[in-house]
């Protein structure tokens, strides 16, 4: 299984980690919520557990918990700016669809 990180996402993650001054990387997971069923969750990682998988791509460290792995296999993490909006964008080959607002997805 792989997780890809674009240049833009890597730069943003590294900037966050540098500003924070500590931590291993960013934890990416999924939770049940939203109108489509699942949503992405991002948080800082200070310690990796035995149930985590660690992916380093393009200089950024992404940690995924074991329960989220099946939903995130092959994921590409990007960081985009569109007008006044900016944020992480996820290209997920496992996603069968997204809600209209783009906040949640279904598999």
Image (cartoon, helix red, strand yellow):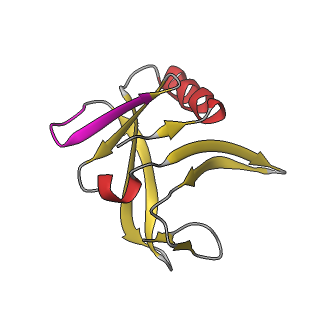
Front-most of residues 8 and 87:
8
Q: Position of residue 14 (x, y in %)?
A: 54, 25
Q: Position of residue 5 (x, y in %)?
A: 54, 36
Q: Is residue 43 above or below residue 72?
A: above
Tell me the residue at 51%/56% (across/down): 92
Quick one: quadrant of the N terminus?
top left
Residue closer to the observer: 46 or 7: 7
Whether residue 50 is in magenta: the answer is: yes
The magenta region covers 48-56
Q: Is residue 44 above or below residue 40?
A: above
**Residue that lies at the very extreme toward the right in this rendered image:** 83
Question: Residue 43: which quarter of the image?
Answer: top left
x then y, percent, for residue 81: 76, 45
Residue found farthest to the bottom? 35
The image shows a total of numbered marks equal to: 0
Inspect the magenta stretch and tell me whether residue 3 lies in it. no
């Amino acid at each position: 299984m792989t997780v890809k990180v674009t240049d833009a996402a890597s730069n943003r993650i590294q900037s966050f980690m540098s500003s924070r001054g500590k931590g291993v990387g960013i934890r990416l997971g999924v939770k049940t919520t939203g109108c489509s069923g699942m949503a992405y969750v991002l948080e800082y990682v200070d310690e990796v557990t035995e149930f985590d998988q660690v992916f380093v791509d393009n200089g950024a460290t992404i940690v995924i918990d074991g329960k989220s792995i099946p939903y995130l296999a092959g994921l590409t993490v990007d960081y985009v700016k569109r007008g006044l909006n900016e944020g992480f964008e996820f290209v997920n080959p496992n996603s069968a669809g997204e809600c209209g607002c783009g906040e949640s997805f279904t598999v």
